[in-house]
Image: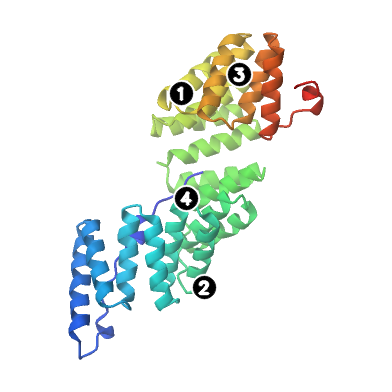
Amino acid sequence: MMVGVFLSAMLSVFAQNEMEVTTVVVVENQEAELAYNKGISFMDTKQYQEAIAQFEEAIRINPAFRQAYVNLGSAKAALKDYDGAVFAFEQSLELDSTQGQVWYSRGLALYNKNDYRQSYESMQSAVRNGYRTAETYYYAGVDLFFLKEYEAAITQYTNAIKTDLSYAYAYNDRGSCYRMLGKYNEAIRDYEIAANYDPQLANIYDNLGSALVKKGDLQAAIKNFNLAIAKKPDFYAAYNNRGEAYFLQGDIKSAFNDFKKATELNKQYALAYNNLGVVYASQKKYEEALKMYANAIKINPNFGMAYYHQAAAQEMLRQFDECCMSLVKARELGVDVPAALTSNCN
């Protein structure tokens, strides 16, 4: 999964429309305009704290200054104050709820807060109010992907593609939806289109490789993982995924080297430690396997399969009490552990 970042939309500023200025300007509004324009100047030079102070001053003088709220939200978003950004955008929308681009900017801020449901609703409001850009549909799709509503996400990505036929991110992410639904042919097709439009995006080749693994075409998968790594040498997930393909091929040495490389590139990558444990276990090196599973669990205490694999190694070492505890924990974390295996565990 790959998410594009479109900060230009988040950071867009609005010049005061001269048609909105009456011929008679009261002193207070003139002062608000001056503060607002200073804020715009600070935005242009990325001095966001200074910009915020000026926009807040403009709002203090003129609480109905709609565009000042919009730019205040953009400045706060630039500083990753997403709560502040959402509040500012909402203040502007209270003054005029038909601002499609402001609904979109609010949606982006909510997305960055991982509030995917509210972000999606905001993107829908943007569309209803005429802001029908490819990015609006794309982020609606991303929200739905994270909500695991894959069919609905496909519809949004398709809308993004209809708006911009060369939108590589949308093809890639639609492919990921198809992959999650087990529709590997459709996923492969979308990944290949995405790679044609943007051949430098390493994530596309990694995703394509993963879909090919699911199809059982391991050699083609490895070829694509190689491309991903060539374009992004520190791509630890691609090393891990290529390691899986090697393991399924029976090339244990290459798999081990790739899993190890993944942990070297990211020492907090629990999945690769788990996979190293699987390699050790396949070689009957159960003590070494337990160390790797312990690393994975320390990094991610909710890694159910690591507990399950740990239990298998503990059983082989005749550590039956520990094996029971690991199986119970794995089951608690959602792993499909047969009840019979834990029936005698205390």
Observer-nearest of 208 and 173? 173
Q: Position of residue 12 (x, y in %)?
A: 32, 64
Mark 3 → mark 2, Cα distance in angstroms: 51 Å
User: Mark 3: which secondary structure?
Assistant: helix
Q: CA distance from mark 4 to mark 2?
A: 23 Å
Q: Residue placed at 42% from the left, 69% from the top?
A: 90
The residue labelled by disc 1 is 263
Residue at the spot of label 4: 169
Q: CA distance from mark 2 to mark 1?
A: 46 Å
Name the residue at 61% across, 10% down. 286
Q: Secondary structure at mark 4?
A: helix
Task: Tell me the CA gap for discs 3 and 1.
Answer: 14 Å
Q: Of tags 4 and 2, which is closer to the observer?
A: 2
Quarter of the picture holding the C terminus: top right
Q: CA distance from mark 4 to mark 1?
A: 27 Å
User: How dense is the environment of label 2, judged by Cα within 10 Å: few (below 14), some, or many (20 and up)?
Assistant: some
Q: Residues within 10 Å of mark 4 (few under 14, many from 20)?
A: many
Question: Left or right of 208: which side holds 8?
Answer: left
> Most extreme residue toward the bottom, as rendered?
24
Give residue 101's position: percent from left, percent from top. Answer: 41, 68
Look at label 1 and name its amino acid: Thr
Q: Between tags 4 and 3, which lies in front?
A: 3
Q: Which mark is residue 128?
A: 2
The numbered dot on residue 238 is none
Q: In terms of secondary structure, where does tag 2 sit?
A: helix
Residue type (three-letter) at the residue carrying disc 2: Arg
Of the numbered discs 4 and 2, the one sitting upstream in the chain is 2
- Left or right, 340 with respect to 224, comes to right
Q: Which residue is mark 3?
A: 278
